[in-house]
Amino acid sequence: MVTALITLGLDQLSKALVRVLLAQDKALSLGGFGELRQVRNPGTAFGIIQGRSWSLFLASIAVFVVLIVVLWHWGKPGSAAFQAGLGLIIGGAVGNIIDRAALGAVIDFIDLGFWPMRSWPVFNLADFAIVAGVVIVLIVVVADIFKKQPQER
């Protein structure tokens, strides 16, 4: 739960700072590491689905609730790594849900334009936390599955 609260707090603080300090038509260069620019994303992660904000909002809440129930059941009591991964997923998801409810769109601002693939989507800390959390949870689950398999001799 602590990881979720920290993730949510950092996400919302970063988005508030971007909204206040960085106009939508301006970009702040990070040298060879891309740039910061404010983008309003009414679609899903990485701007995939556009134009259905209320149905998308309700669907994201439903998916979030199902995900939490399934992961909570799987990880209870769970390892510290599993709980941290779950916290990252919850904190990131709630951060993006808050944006969608309050602003009608998610605030994205990290643009890794330095990648050879120039079309890499703009994202935010919540998106990063969700992806990192999913990777951690998958590693823990796969490791747990391999531990439970009987060792062949």
Image (cartoon, rainbow, N blue to C red):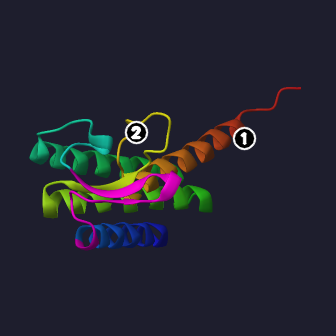
Separation (CA) of disc 1 from disc 2: 37 Å
Closest to the observer: 123 or 131?
Answer: 123
Q: Quadrant of residue 20?
A: bottom left
**Residue 21 belongs to the span the image colors magenta:** yes
Q: Is residue 76 visible?
A: no
Q: Position of residue 119 (x, y in %)?
A: 37, 35
| 110 part of magenta stretch | no
Q: Position of residue 103 (x, y in %)?
A: 14, 61
Q: Which mark is residue 147?
A: 1
Q: Position of residue 89 (x, y in %)?
A: 42, 55
Tell me the magenta residue range: 20-40
Disc assigned to residue 110: none
Q: Is label 2 in a helix, a strand or a loop? A: loop
Q: Which residue is located at x 21 percent, y 59 percent?
A: 24
Element assignment for label 1: helix
Of 96 and 107, the residue lying toward us: 107
Quadrant of the drawing holding the C terminus: top right
129 over 12 or under it: above or below: above
| Residue in the image at 18% along x and 47% along y | 42
